[in-house]
Amino acid sequence: GETRDTWELGRRHSTMSHALPNSHTVIVGRTIMTRSLALLAIFLACASAVSARALAPASAQLEFKRPLEDVNILWNKCMDVPELGESCIGIFVIADNGTLGVQLNISGHVFQEAVVKGNQVCLDCDSLLELMTDIPVLSAFTPIIKLVEKLHHLIPADVFSICVDIDNMKYDGTYFDGCPKLQATLMCWEGKCLYKGSVDFGCFHVKA
C-alpha cells in the first residue's frame, strides 16, 4: 500500500545516504524525520481518540498465557507470515481434561493456551510487547505501542493483534479436527497497515 511504499522508500534512502554528499544526507535525514513524526502523529491520534469499537475486540479475545509445561505436540505446521517471518502453529491435547490447546511459535517466542472458549486465542499485551523486541520491523514502534497501552491499559486489536483462529473445529468423542489460520494486524490506523491479513495453515486431525 501507500504507507508500505513510503517506508520502503525511506529504507532505500537510508542505504544510499552514505554515498551522497553531506547536503543530500541532510535532506534524506529530514525526510526520514518527517516520516517518523508522521507515524508518531498517527499513533498518538490513535491513543487519544481510539473508539469503543476498537477497544471491544481486544477485551473480548481469549488471550495466550505463559507457556504450559510438558505438552505433547500432536500436529505442527510452519508458514512464512509477512513481516513476522517463519511462524509455527502446534496442536496439543491437555491429558487431564481432554481440552484442545494451541501453541504459537514466532521468531523463537513460544506461546500456548487451551482453547476453552470459542475457536480463537490471541497474544496478550505483554506477549505482543515481548515479540516486538526481536522483530526489527516491529521494534521501531515499541515506544508508541507502549504509550497506547499505558493510556488505555490494553493494545487495541484494530491497531496491533496476533491471533490463531480455528475454522471448522469439531470433536467426535475421539478426534479433534480443525483448520487453523494466523490472523495478524500489524500497526494499523485508518486503513493504513504495515500488514493485515491471514495465513492458512491447513487442517489437523488429532486424537484426544
Image (spheres, rainbow, N blue to C red):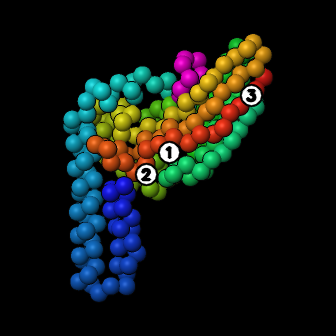
Q: Is mark 3 on a helix, strand or loop?
A: strand
Residue, x 46% and y 47% (percent of image)? Answer: 132
Q: How crowded is mark 1: few (under 14 residues within 10 Å), some or many (20 or more)?
A: some
Residue, x 36% and y 55% (percent of image)? Answer: 1
Q: Magenta part of the protein: which range?
A: 114-121
Q: Where is residue 112 in the image (x, y as percent from the top left)?
A: 61, 31
Residue, x 70% and y 17% (percent of image)? Answer: 171
Q: Which of 81 and 168 is in front in this view?
A: 168
> In the image, is residue 8 part of the stretch drawn in magenta?
no
Q: What element carries label 2?
A: helix
Q: Where is residue 27 in the image (x, y as percent from the top left)?
A: 23, 76
Q: Where is residue 89 in the image (x, y as percent from the top left)?
A: 64, 38
Residue position marked by numbered label 2 in the rendering: 138
Q: Residues within 10 Å of mark 3 (few under 14, many from 20)?
A: some
> In the image, is residue 115 part of the stretch drawn in magenta?
yes
**For marks 2 and 1 on the same chain, the one whose residue lies earlier in the sequence:** 1
Marks counted in the figure total 3
**For marks 1 and 3 on the same chain, the one whose residue lies earlier in the sequence:** 1
Residue position marked by numbered label 1 in the rendering: 131
Amino acid type of the residue tagged 1 in the rendering: Leu
Left or right placement of residue 149 versus residue 106 in this view: left
Would you identify the image quadrant in which residue 114 lies? top right
Residue position marked by numbered label 3 in the rendering: 205
Q: How far apart are marks 2 and 3 (CA)?
A: 34 Å
Would you identify the image quadrant in which residue 153 lies? top left
Q: Is residue 70 visible?
A: no
**For marks 2 and 3 on the same chain, the one whose residue lies earlier in the sequence:** 2
Amino acid type of the residue tagged 3 in the rendering: His
Q: Nearer the viewer, residue 54 or 105?
A: 54
Assess whether mark 1 and mark 2 are in contact (beta carbons under 8 angstroms). yes
